[in-house]
Image (spheres, rainbow, N blue to C red):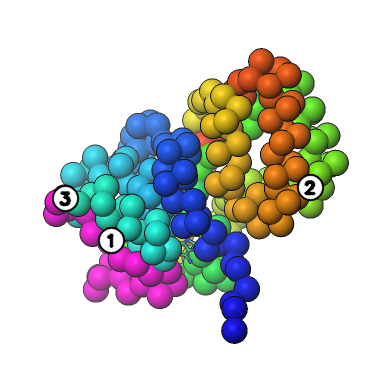
Amino acid sequence: MTMPREQRRVFGEVADAYDDVRPGYRAEILDLITTYAGRMPRTVVESGAGTGKGTVLLRSLGVPLTCVEPDPEMAALLTRRFDGDDRVSVVVSRFEDWNPPPGGVDLLASAQAWHWVDHTRRTRLAAEALVPGGVLAVFGHDFGFADAGLRAAMHAVYLQHAPEIADRPGRPVHTLHPGAFDPEELRGSSWFTDVEEQQVETVVSYDTARYLTLLSTFSPHRMLPEQQRSRLHRALADLVDARGGVVEQKLTTGLWLARRLS
Ligand SMILES: C[S@@+](CC[C@H](N)C(=O)[O-])C[C@H]1O[C@@H](n2cnc3c(N)ncnc32)[C@H](O)[C@@H]1O
């Protein structure tokens, strides 16, 4: 019996491409986390580490870092990346199934991956993973466009070829851009306090071919039937080529911070 393909499991299908084209995270994100924490964390766990784009940043803290990543292909690349680094350990597991160390860790971070953890349990699981006073840091990119004209033209292409994944006015930003997160979930919980939100903006240029590769790493694109995805990508490539062959991707990196109540 073949199992249905799950959207949260599609990243490993393109692990190398993901690692090649997905943007990493600016050092400011780590500065904001450590400033918020007020002291250097002694232990860190990262949920949904993927190929290590956020891990690289967290590793620079120089303290033991456990990466929890369920996809075997993503985890294999991550393991190769930190081969020989005895501060980094990789656990192939969903965050929901991972057992935190007794007493908890000082910092739980998740880059572009917290939305894949069961929404009904993740706040409690985060609290259980942290020491009292420990910090939860959720961050991720919202992929926008520097050129509003290109954005509008692209939107028309999506409406024609894949309306089911086109932006829709009124849809909450955290469902549209899974890197985003609704902090009300933490504010409304009895486990966390001092909830804060920060943003960092960056512009990254992609030529047409790399832009298509980038799109092929987004799970809504991966879930489209192959023929439909090819038609959509061809039409987007034609559009980008007609406008000079470059997409200036405006990344708004959101960072949400919260402290576990003592
Ligand atoms: C968009 S990728 C982000 C990877 C990396 N953190 C980054 O910033 O590039 C999302 C990752 O979350 C992982 N993931 C999916 N379900 C998960 C779960 N239940 N617990 C932890 N990670 C999960 C996926 O396998 C994937 O590697």
Number of the label disc, if any, that sits on residue 162 = 2
Say which element carries label 3.
loop
Dot 1 alpha-carbon crowd within 10 angstroms: few under 14, some 14 to 19, many 20 or more: some
Mark 1 CB lies closer than 8 A to ligand 1: no
Residue positioned 74% across, 26% down in the render: 239
Q: Earlier in the sequence, mark 3 or mark 1?
A: 3
- Please indicate, yes or no, whether residue 196 appears anywhere in the rendered image: no
The one of 146 and 217 positioned closer to us in this rendering: 217
Q: Which residue is mark 1?
A: 90
Q: Quadrant of residue 108?
A: bottom left
Q: Nearer the viewer, mark 3 or mark 2?
A: 2
Where is residue 260? Give x, y as percent.
Answer: 39, 60
Name the residue at 79% across, 28% down.
152
Percent of width and height locating residue 27: 35, 32
Q: Which residues are magenta?
A: 84-109
Label placed on residue 85: 3
Name the residue at the top extreme. 244
Residue 164: percent from left, percent from top: 79, 52
